[in-house]
Each structure stands twice: as C-alpha cells, then as structure tokens.
Image: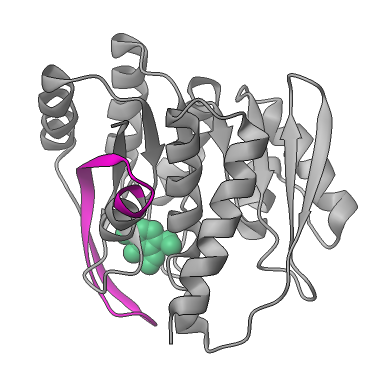
Amino acid sequence: MKRVLTIAGFDPSGWAGVSADLKTFGDLGADGVAAITALTAQNRSTVVTVLPIDPKFVRQEILTLLAEADFDAIKIGMLGSFEIVNMLIRLLKKEGLKNIVLDPVLRSSSGRRLVDKKGEAEIIKLLPLVRVVTPNINEAEVLSGEKIKDLSDMERAAEKIQGFGPEAVVVTGGHVAGPPTDILFNSRNKQFSHFKGVRLKGRKERFHGTGCIFSSALATGLARGYTVKKATDDARQYLIKTLKARR
Ligand code: PXL
C-alpha cells in the first residue's frame, strides 16, 4: 500500500482539510497519515475561527510519522501561519522530502484568511521544494501577480508560477464563469494540457473542500508513480464522482 501524508488544517465539517484528505487517500486505496497545522471552527459555508498549531508541535507530528516509514507522496494544504510555512521549508530541505503536491491555500470560499499575511508571502519559497502546485484562479493571481480573466491568462499564470521552481502547475478553473477548464503546465515537456469539465449545479456548500480533494487525489496518483498528467486526469475523475455523490 502506498503511504501518503497530508499536512493541512482540520475542518470539523469533514468536507475540507485533513478529514477530506484522509477520506480521499482511503477511497483511492492508499494508506493516509496526517499532520494537523491548524484547528478551525467552521461549517460548510462559514469559517468562524482559525487557530494555528505551534510549529514545533507540527514538526514533531511530521517527524514522528517519518520515523516509522517513508512517505510515497505528500500533500500540503492550509498552513495557518508564517511560522509554520517557515518551519516546513526548513524541514522539507533537511529531510529531503520529495513527490510533494502543494495546494497553496490562502483563503476560504467565504474570504477568511487561512494563512496570515506574512505566511502568504512566504509560500512562494515552498515552490522550488514541491513537484506540483494546484492554485485556483484567486491563488494563481496572488502567486503570479497577474489578473486572470480567461484561458490564456491561466496559461500565462501557470507558466510564471512554474518559474518559481516546481516541476508542474495545475491552475484549476472552477472559479471562472462558464464550463470549467483546468490547465496543466509541465516544465519537462514545456507543454500545456487543458482538461475541460462540465459545470455542476448546486449551492456553494456542495463545492466546499474541492481543492483539498483534488490535490490529495493527485498526490495519491504520484505516490503510485503515475505521470503528472495521468494523476491530474484521475484526480479530476475522482473529484467529479465525489461532488456528484454530495447532496
Ligand atoms: O478549501 C480550503 C480549506 C483548506 N483547509 C481547511 C479549510 C478550508 C476551507 O474552509 O477549512 C482546513
């Protein structure tokens, strides 16, 4: 069984954060383990409070799991504070951890910060240490410093973010109007892949945790040794199936 670690926040509603990540790993047949970076008080529509965990404790969480067995892949989600981002940068370098998917979580759908302002700026320094980054449109705008209105803007942002050091970038298209298209830019072949989807209907709560599930499924594919393109394709299929099953 492949062993996949999530480093993310806890969402007590179960649809986002570590609980969604562990469910995704389990559904896809991987052995999921978790290090919690923050607690939150929230339901599926509103985040009320965010409580980042002491970075020394988060470090212990990760190192204790690592002492037992290596990870085949890692997914990084909500980080909460500058201190945690900083600790993680040092830990990933020191331990030489590889095959990492970074979901650069900045804000909840309701607009609440999920990492403080200083931490948001520090996330750029994680990019050279990870294999794939999966920003949504808003996160891609912040990381690239460019406004995104259409597919060519998404391509430009993906390429610019790749320039910060990851092997590949997937900009997810759920946050622009119309049929959603996800765009992958892979530095290995310098090529873009477009993954066209169908807009699912429903209240916004139905889409709570979408980015968490997608990045966790992608990490599971990488753990299995799939290419980034196949892992992306499979992760999208799993996400669509999961969203369709929600009411
Ligand atoms: O979907 C972003 C996200 C990630 N991680 C946690 C969250 C949320 C959104 O609410 O709570 C823990």
Q: Is residue 103 left or right of residue 186?
A: left
Q: Is residue 197 left or right of residue 124?
A: right
Q: Coloring scheme of the render?
A: one colour
User: Which residue sits furthest right?
Assistant: 152
As displayed, is residue 110 above or below residue 184?
Answer: below
Image-quadrant location for residue 59: top left
| Numbered marks: total | 0
Viewer-closest of 221 and 7:
221
* Residue under the image location 17 percent in, 36 percent down: 58
> Would you say residue 241 is visible in this rendering?
yes
Viewer-closest of 227 and 105:
227
Residue 184 magenta-highlighted: no
Viewer-closest of 63 and 111:
63
Q: Quadrant of ligand 1?
A: bottom left
* Residue under the image location 42 percent in, 43 percent down: 118
> Would you say residue 113 is visible in this rendering?
no
The N terminus sits in image quarter: top left
The picture places residue 168, in percent across and down from the top left corner, at 65, 30
**Magenta range:** 25-51
Main SS of the magenta segment?
Answer: strand
The picture places residue 82, in percent across and down from the top left corner, at 34, 39
